[in-house]
Image: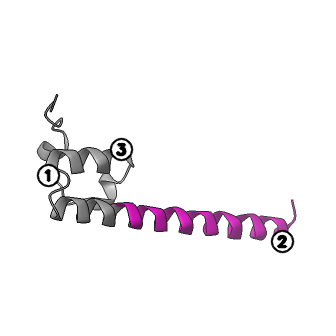
Amino acid sequence: MSEEDHRDFLLSALRAASLRAKMFEVEINSIGIALKSGMVTVPDALKWIKDIGALELVGLIPNALAEQEPPDTK
């Protein structure tokens, strides 16, 4: 591949990464709104954060809390 091809590929990858970051932002904001309004519990919000792979992005969650499994509500 030429230098121009490499540049174009990298630019495309950066655009895709930017879109993924925006999707994380929307999802994380949705979790916050749901938690604040009482639509989800803390354990459910933590599970949601884990499910989307954003636990590292949140970063301030104590490990002990993040490792808890949500209670079975059945």
Query: In this picture, is 71 found above or below 59?
Result: above
Q: Which residue is mark 1?
A: 62
Please tell me whether mark 2 sits on a helix, a strand or a loop: helix
Residue at 87% x, 65% y is 2
| Residue count near mark 2 (Cα–Cα under 10 Å), binned few <14, some 14–19, many ≥20 | few
Of the two numbered discs 1 and 3 in the rendering, the one whose residue sits closer to the viewer: 3
Q: Amino acid at mark 3?
A: Asp
Q: Nearer the viewer, residue 53 or 7?
A: 53
- Residue 61 in which image quadrant: bottom left
Q: Which mark is residue 4?
A: 2
| Residue count near mark 1 (Cα–Cα under 10 Å), binned few <14, some 14–19, many ≥20 | few
Q: Which mark is residue 51?
A: 3
Q: Amino acid at mark 1?
A: Pro
Exactly how many numbered labels are in the figure?
A: 3
Residue at 33% x, 60% y is 57
Gap in angstroms between the C-alphas marked 2 and 1: 45 Å
Percent position (x, y) of residue 44? 21, 45
Q: Is the magenta region chiefly helix, strand or loop?
A: helix
Q: Amino acid at mark 2?
A: Glu
Image: magenta residue range = 1-27
**Mark positioned earlier in the residue sequence (2 or 1):** 2
Q: Quadrant of the N terminus?
A: bottom right
Gap in angstroms between the C-alphas marked 3 and 2: 37 Å
| Residue count near mark 3 (Cα–Cα under 10 Å), binned few <14, some 14–19, many ≥20 | few
Query: In this picture, is 14 found above or below 67?
Result: below
Q: Nearer the viewer, residue 69 or 55?
A: 69
Q: Is residue 32 magenta?
A: no
Residue at 17% x, 28% y is 74
Please tell me whether mark 3 sits on a helix, a strand or a loop: helix
